Amino acid sequence: MRVKIFRASNTTEALRMVKEEMGPEAVILRTRTLERSEADHGRPGDNIEVTAAVDYDLEATSVSGSAFRRQEELYRRWNVLEKELCEIKDALWMLEAGSLLKPELYFNKEVKDRYSCLRGFGLNRSALTRLMSRSTTAENGAECVTGDHDFSIRRYLLEVLDSIRIGGRGGKGDGARIVSFLGPTGVGKTTSMAKLAALAAVKRGKRVAMITLDTFRIAAVAQMETYARIMSVPLEVATTREELQAAVSRHSDCDAVFIDTIGRSPNNMEELKELKDILSIPEKIHHYLVLSATTQYENLIHAEKRFNLLPFDSYIFTKLDEAEDPTAMINFLVMGEKPVSFFTMGQQVPEDIEPASKRRLAAMMLNRNRTAEAEYRREVV
């Protein structure tokens, strides 16, 4: 218990002092009028002395309760701020929609709902412009279910997926038994090649050969030799076009030949031209552009533009397991002119690779949409 003495000019003031310092739970133990000799030792005009006490547990509870009330007020203000930010975000979306849509479409509820849904998938301005420029379902006279949120999600999800090309997996069906793996440094070209070579050689029993052009990275050849030994397939090393042609010719009886290349910076056009020269052999090569799903959209566009010098035939996207938000990849594929062939999501060879599919893309987009929607609902509550 904490005990304290308060002195004031009157009882009302003394009780106010007790309440302010010790809280409403304080107990008054004694009240007395000061004699003149005692009052002279205090402040001028102090005539009343009040002795008050409060239990330590009650005091702690009072402080805790006060802190809780302050915390509640902070949460309330924070929620109000979040709600206002969400309203600002929605207003900006609608402003953006106004710049993309024709005036007669902007005031069409279904068109605005379609825009909001596509925007909810994380599509950027370029992808939205491409999709919104197409005629809507309502304009085509198709039956529309209004007010059904899940229906809208499915309908517009299919619209996004229809704009993405899947395929281009090389092989004899595409007129090429030779495939190469191009791309920036560190995106997973060598591992992707090893996975596809292992699937062909070990899982399907095909005759496979591997060729590496990467003599630049430390231990790159040793890594390829390890893969080749485990899979029991031949490995060749080439550094010039003539050496590559000779290596390909030595394995003309193979069902598939996989060529690993040196990672090149999209900013170094001279190195890209050198790589193009090495790969310029008479045989048809299906070139995969290997990109990481963790790369920003602008950098994906930049890489595609520069590596198109070779040119490539389809994409492989790696590190799907490391990409928290797939929207950069989705936007890129919506805008891309080439198909996506494979997805990889780990380091295990050959398990962590699969043919690209719209099912996988849909799962990633819906997961992203649910997360964004949950955050939105939490903000406005």
Image: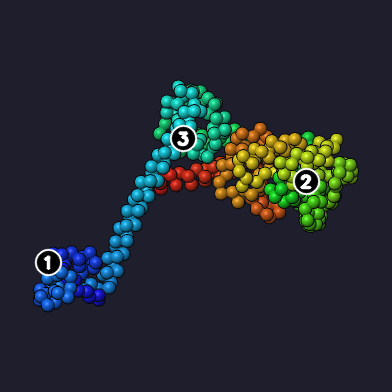
Instruction: Identify the image quadrant of residue 222.
Output: bottom right
- Residue pictured at 88% horizontal, 44% vertical: 243
On the question of residue 313 being in view, the answer is: no
Residue 22 image point, x, y percent: 23, 68
Q: Is residue 7 left or right of residue 103?
A: left
Residue at point 14% right, 74% down? 40
The tag earlier along the polypeptide, 3 or 1, is 1
User: Which of the 4 image quadrants contains residue 174?
Assistant: top right
| Helix, strand or loop under label 3 | helix
Q: Quadrant of residue 229?
A: bottom right
For disc 1, the neighbor class at 10 Å (few under 14, some 14 to 19, many from 20) is some
Helix, strand or loop at disc 2? Answer: loop
Judged left or right of residue 158, residue 186 is right
Q: Which residue is mark 1?
A: 10
Placement of the N terminus among the 4 image quadrants:
bottom left
C-alpha span from label 1 to label 2: 92 Å
Q: How is the image coloured?
A: rainbow
| Residue type, label 3 | Trp
Residue underneath mark 3:
93
Q: How much space separates mark 2 and mark 3, taking CA atoms?
A: 43 Å
Q: Give yes or no for contact between labels 3 and 1 (Cβ–Cβ under 8 Å).
A: no
Q: Amino acid at mark 2?
A: Thr
